[in-house]
Amino acid sequence: MRIDTVFFDVDGTLVDATRDITNSVNHALRALKMPELSREKVVSYIGTGVRDLLRQSLSVDDEALVEKAVKLFGDHYVEHAADETVLYPHVIEILEYLKDKRKIILTNRFSSFADATLRGVGIRKYFEEIAGGDDYSCIKPLACAVDGVVGRLGIDKEKALIVGDMDIDVMTGKNSGVKTCWITHGLGRAEEIVPLKPDYIIDDLLELKEIVR
């Protein structure tokens, strides 16, 4: 099929940032005199936005405290976004292959956090725009997460593909009418994603060469 635009998720799709995210979560928790968390626990909270990540990490429903934690997290994270973050295999190769396609980051991270990570690992230059989760009322899996970008940049949905590692990425594509591709090497679980029937399932980003011509 003809694909002109590829939307990429960040965490679990292009990079493994779980160590740096965990370090920044624990920085915020220490500052607030809250118990630190294991990386496994923090990873289980990744996906539905920064505020939700900190809300679950705090185990409280105090919005003022959550906002304080978000700021502590963010100030630390932008300075340490790529200390231990690594690219998944073949990221550079597939981005080079897609050099003639429009490439957009679609993430529930705040845009500035995604930007810091992508610059830190050297791949920010490949992406036309970062559509982040700064507006908490419009994040994946809501269709508006895609629709706002599509309308602003004049993207043809019928020639677009979303590549992500979690159920919310596939759900976003389904909700917005964009083709979906699940990459299995990330944070998502097969039992949650296969029933959603993504259009494509790949184990390695290089397999996009067989999908996007």
Image (tube, helix red, strand yellow):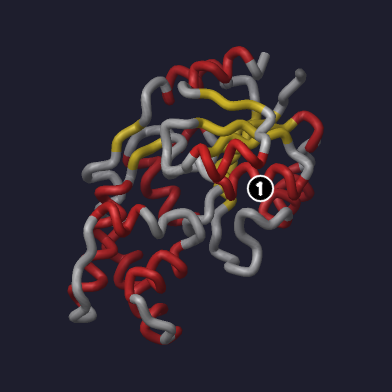
At x 27%, y 51%, the residue is: 20
Compared with residue 204, is residue 48 higher up or lower down, i.e. above or below? below
At x 41%, y 20%, the residue is: 90
Q: Secondary structure under badge 1?
A: helix
Q: In which quarter of the image is the N terminus?
A: top right
Left or right relative to 139: residue 68: left
Question: In x, y percent, where is residue 99?
Answer: 57, 21
Q: In which quarter of the image is the C terminus?
A: top right
Compared with residue 93, is residue 10 higher up or lower down, i.e. above or below? below
At x 38%, y 41%, the residue is: 119
Residue behind mark 1: 171
Q: Inspect the image, locate mark 1, and give the three-letter code of the amino acid beneath it.
A: Met
Question: In x, y percent, where is residue 191?
Answer: 53, 41
Judge by depth and name the residue closer to the eye, 177 or 149: 177
Left or right relative to 119: residue 211: right
Judge by depth and name the residue closer to the eye, 196 or 163: 196
Question: In x, y percent, where is residue 150?
Answer: 75, 45
Compared with residue 136, is residue 207 higher up or lower down, i.e. above or below? above
Label 1 neighbour load within 10 Å: few <14, some 14-19, many 20+:
many
Left or right relative to 140: residue 119: left
Left or right relative to 174: residue 70: left
Question: In x, y percent, where is residue 173?
Answer: 69, 43
Q: How many labels does the image show?
A: 1
At x 51%, y 37%, the residue is: 190
Judge by depth and name the residue closer to the eye, 31 or 170: 170
Compared with residue 112, is residue 204 higher up or lower down, i.e. above or below? above
